[in-house]
Image (tube, rainbow, N blue to C red):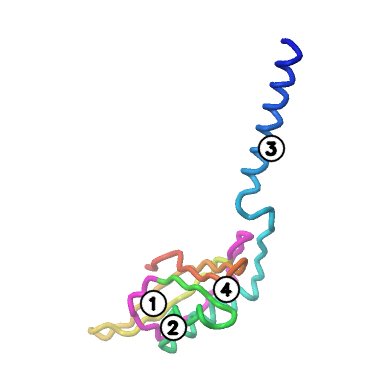
Amino acid sequence: MTPIFRIFDLNLTRIAIAMCALLCAGCSGGRTITLDEDIARQSLTKALDAWKSGGKAEDLQHQAPAIAVNDVDWSHGRKLVGFQVNGNGTSDGRSLHVPVTLTMQPSQRGAAAIIKATYAVGVDPAIVVVRETEGD
């Protein structure tokens, strides 16, 4: 190989390494995501208390700190009459996954629906509560 081609190959290698480094950094700009488990638990409880008291999930986005909530039953207007957080949950480093037993308003036949669900709660860069499972 002539010296000019070696320089060309070396530059291509450097460009490829630089592109891989940029792709690996992603959109986070190298910022580390942190999970404060206490804030995550408090946020989940605050969201479920709001649902139980008849509030709307959208209302939590206008409070400080804002909480974005996604729960299919809540968004469809089902009434929550009770809930129990089952344990401290497990962390994947970005989100806290918390098992919760939900008690929904009795149906027309008079039987309350008991649903076992898991919520994923992230707190960085924003507080987000998402129901992962649809229950039993």
| x and y, in percent, of residue 46 in the image | 54, 82
- How far, Cα to Cα, is label 2 from label 1? 7 Å
The mark nearer the N terminus, 3 or 4, is: 3
The mark nearer the N terminus, 2 or 4, is: 2
Looking at the rendered structure, the kind of residue marked 2 is: Trp
- Front residue of 135/57: it is 57
Nearest-to-viewer mark from 1 and 4: 1
Question: Label 1 belongs to which residue?
Answer: 74
Q: Residues within 10 Å of mark 1 (few under 14, many from 20)?
A: some
Residue sitting at x 65%, y 48%: 25
Residue at the outermost front position: 4
Image-quadrant location for residue 19: top right
Report the disc number at residue 87: 4
Image-quadrant location for residue 103: bottom left
**Tag 1 and tag 4, C-beta contact below 8 Å:** no
Looking at the image, can residue 84 be seen?
A: no
Residue 94 highlighted magenta (yes or no)? yes
Question: Label 2 belongs to which residue?
Answer: 51
Look at the image and give the residue range highlighted in magenta.
72-95
